[in-house]
Image (cartoon, grey):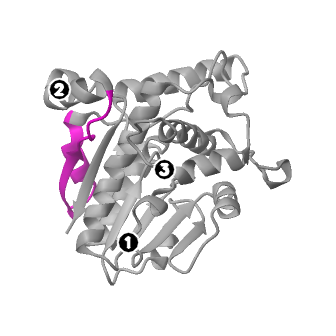
Amino acid sequence: MADQDKVTVRLSPVPETLLWNLYHRAYEARQPRTVLHDPKAIELVDRLDFPFEETFGPPHPLLAQGQALRVRSFDAAVQSFLADHPTGTVVNLAEGLETQFWRIDNGRARWLGVELPETAELRLALLPDTERRRTLAQSVLDLSWMDEVDTEGGVLLTAQGLLMYLRPPQVRELIAACAERFRGGALVFDAVPRWLSAGTQRDERRGEKRGEKRPAPGYRMPGMPWGLNAGELEKVRTAHPGVVDVRELHLPRGRGPYFGALTPVLHRLPALRNLRPTMTAIARFA
């Protein structure tokens, strides 16, 4: 690709995590026995003028596969929704440069993305809106985006890589607002365990004390104020009486011993399930 076709990227620390996700998703998509067919992610990495390896380090195969399998758990939830609501609306809250639409769109559903302005600008430069796929440039905490959601055919909301970067009261308020507004719908989200949330916040505080603009050596995620252990999922129901069911979505099997044999064990054993770095769950509203 010619240099003039490249898109330059400059994002603040939390939005920049979307590039980490894209980088690892594209790496896994390039593998001969990939667990995620995602040519659009590869295309985006090739179009961006961004020092991926300098910023994030060499791709970690285990992390990349784990990221891809987590993405597939979201895909499966959305596909299940579309099977029952083929003309429904999928609302992606802070999806960044996620390319789910190109993997699983059914040709009939409506898709609405809600992005911070700096992220929306990048997404629209790379993935312009279409008649069925729109992007709103605003914080998900500005609940006016809800007025733009067509609820006629059913609604499924996704929050992939979002909630952990909000403060706990903000998470609770957002879930409550969704439950109140989108009765009969559902929210698919991911969460990090409390040990990981606490660790990222310690790292961030140490970096601030040293006056670091970017922690070194290597890349570390920004602080994640909200953590939720797998054994605490029922707490999500306390956000609003309309949250009637919350359950974990298990990862599909992947390659190798960790994702092929060990991961299912981590889901079943209470003593181990909170050690996983991420959890994907669905909350249903009534």
Other-residue count near label 3 (Cα within 10 Å), few / some / many at <14 / 14–19 / ≥20? many
Disc 1 secondary structure class: loop
Q: CA distance from mark 2 to mark 3?
A: 28 Å
Q: Which residue is mark 2?
A: 265
Residue type for callout 1: Asn
Disc 2 secondary structure class: helix
Q: Which residues are magenta?
A: 231-255
Give the percent coordinates (x, y) of residue 230.
Answer: 24, 35
Q: Which residue is mark 1?
A: 106
Q: Earlier in the sequence, mark 3 or mark 1?
A: 3
Quadrant of the rendered structure where residue 164 is? top left
Q: Is residue 182 left or right of residue 5?
A: left
| Residue at x 51% of width, y 60% of height | 140
Disc 3 secondary structure class: loop
Q: Nearer the viewer, residue 250 or 175?
A: 250
Residue type for callout 3: Asp
| Residue at x 73% of width, y 21% of height | 211
For the image, the number of numbered tags is: 3
- Say which quadrant the C terminus sits in: bottom left
Q: CA distance from mark 3 to mark 1?
A: 16 Å
Residue type for callout 2: Val
Magenta stretch contains residue 235: yes
Q: CA distance from mark 1 to mark 2?
A: 34 Å
Quadrant of the rendered structure where residue 115 is? bottom right
Magenta stretch contains residue 8: no
Residue 38, disc? 3
Residue 167, disc? none
> Quick check: can you spot residue 156?
yes
**63 in relation to 210, above or below:** below
Give the percent coordinates (x, y) of residue 5.
Answer: 80, 55
